[in-house]
Amino acid sequence: MYHSLLEERQIEHREKKTIVAALYEAKIEDKEIIRLLKKYCNINEEEALNIFKNEKFINAPCRELEQYLLLEKGYDYKTSDLFINKHAVRVLVNNPELSKLPPAKLYTVAKEHEEK
């Protein structure tokens, strides 16, 4: 019983993240994304903001960086995933303003972090 409840919550969280990612990628206004998330996922403002901020400042920039690494730098999926999770996420968490950088510049900043 407990195990299935935990799995259900994980699935629900993944679905919320997917909804936010789709709306964000479709360039829906930030406030509207939060409103829709609250309405259709039946969550409070704090949870909606948390999911949205993770998408805007971490997940979306990391997806763009992944495409850059795969298509421009010749990384394979495993190496790009490792680089992103080990370095890019850390620099984005520590400085959300870096999420505004284009993927090439974000790569440079994360690469500098890797060398430290």
Image (tube, helix red, strand yellow):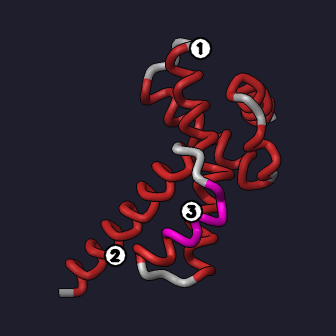
Quarter of the picture holding the N terminus: bottom left
**Amino acid at pointer 2:** Arg
What residue is shown with label 2? Answer: 9
In magenta, the rendered stretch is 29-36
For marks 3 and 2 on the same chain, the one whose residue lies earlier in the sequence = 2
Residue 60, percent from left and from top: 58, 44
Say left or right for 25 vs 110: left
Give whichever of 6, 44 is nearer the camera: 44
Residue 31 colored magenta?
Answer: yes
Residue 106, percent from left and from top: 74, 32
| Residue 30 location, quadrant | bottom right
Say left or right for 113 vs 21: right
Instruction: Tell me, yes or no, whether the two marked residues, 2 and 1, touch with CB atoms within 8 Å.
Output: no
Residue 52, percent from left and from top: 60, 62
**What's the distance in space between the residues labelled 2 and 1, CA to CA?**
37 Å
What residue is shown with label 3? Answer: 33
What residue is shown with label 1? Answer: 73
Q: Looking at this view, name the residue that lies furthest to the left.
A: 1
**What's the distance in space between the residues labelled 3 and 2, CA to CA?**
21 Å
Disc 1 is placed on an element classified as loop
Give whichever of 99, 75 is nearer the camera: 99
**Amino acid at pointer 1:** Lys
For marks 2 and 1 on the same chain, the one whose residue lies earlier in the sequence = 2
Disc 3 is placed on an element classified as helix
For marks 1 and 3 on the same chain, the one whose residue lies earlier in the sequence = 3
- Name the residue located 69 percent from the left edge and 49 percent from the top edge: 90
**Amino acid at pointer 3:** Ile
